[in-house]
Image (cartoon, grey):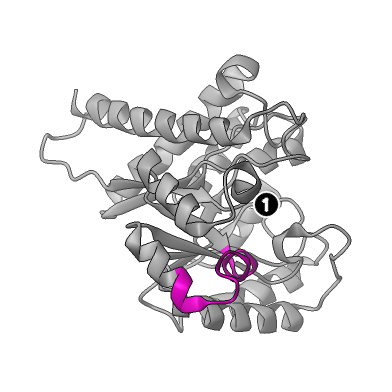
Amino acid sequence: MMSSKTHYPQLKIFRTIWGAESQFSSDINVLFSELYRLGFDGIEASLNDIHRLSKNNDEFFIETLSKNQLELIAICYTNWADFVPETWEDLTVDEHLNNLKRELEQVMKYNPIHINIHGGQDNWTLEQQEAFFQGALDLQAKYPNVTSSHETHRGRSLFNPTLTLHLISRFPNLRLTADFSHWLVVCERLLNHPSDIERMRQIISRVDHIHARVGSVDHAQVNDPLINAPKETQLMQNWWQMIWTEHMKQNKTITTLTPEYGPIPYAMSSDIDVWKLTNQEMERQRNNYQQWIIQNHD
């Protein structure tokens, strides 16, 4: 039970640009206006997203974002940008770090409030993983006014919880973007064994940003969280609420979340209305956050 004087961070919810153009509009005047109307606080976008949406007009992008009272979480890739098929390369640690350096420099001109990093690759040795994060954290430290975190994602360095726990133990400043749907697929289990629970507890203490997508042991995205995956939905909601509790303990002023449901092949059918699914998750998390605050007051 928390005191009535407890400070709760402001929940800010961001809309991933992934799939949004095809689902609604590629005209950012129209798209951004609709996202604001729906209740989103901002967008999460990569450099490729920004260049495409703005038609390479940086000033137009920044002005349109501001006009619609939206903020930006920028995505940086060290390899395999936007997961374009057949573009993965087996790069060295130094090549990844050079790419990160360039991407960080470029996204800063768009005034992001946070940077989400898709970093490293899953086939490195432990020595390479540690060398990458040492270099990445040094680069991130050059931008002390903007927080940044590394996403837990298949194909990247943080593709499984055991390696992630080792790396956050090795690097006290390493912060995470939690997309735990990937780990259910990688591990092929719900991560609810007592040893998994303890591992997740330690990992959750290092999360800065949430990607709220419900997955299963077979798919990183379910068709409908409440209908198709009630057990997984409750498991992930518990994790997200644990993150909110950590943010409260860490005296964060805001906590950020992106309901990240994507089109095919993440959606298992073209019949899935991903636009509607994403909006429903946004509304569900706003309600869940208010319920979480009420429960902590009891």
Q: Is residue 50 magenta?
A: yes
Residue, disc 1? 153
Q: Which quarter of the figure is the N terminus placed in?
A: top left
- Span highlighted in magenta in the image: 46-61
Percent across and percent down for residue 118 are: 64, 63
Please state which of residues 244 and 61 is positioned toward the viewer in this rendering. 61
Residue at the left extreme of this rendering: 5
Percent across and percent down for residue 89 are: 85, 70
Of the residues shown, which amino acid type is indicated by label 1?
His
Q: Is residue 104 magenta?
A: no
Q: Residue at x 79, y 60 (%)?
A: 84
> What secondary structure is marked by label 1?
loop
In the rendered view, tell whether residue 25 sits above or below residue 76. above
Residue 39 shows in this picture:
no
* 37 to the left or right of 52: left
Q: Residue at x 73, y 51 (%)?
A: 154
* 170 to the left or right of 141: right
Q: Which quarter of the figure is the C terminus placed in?
A: top left
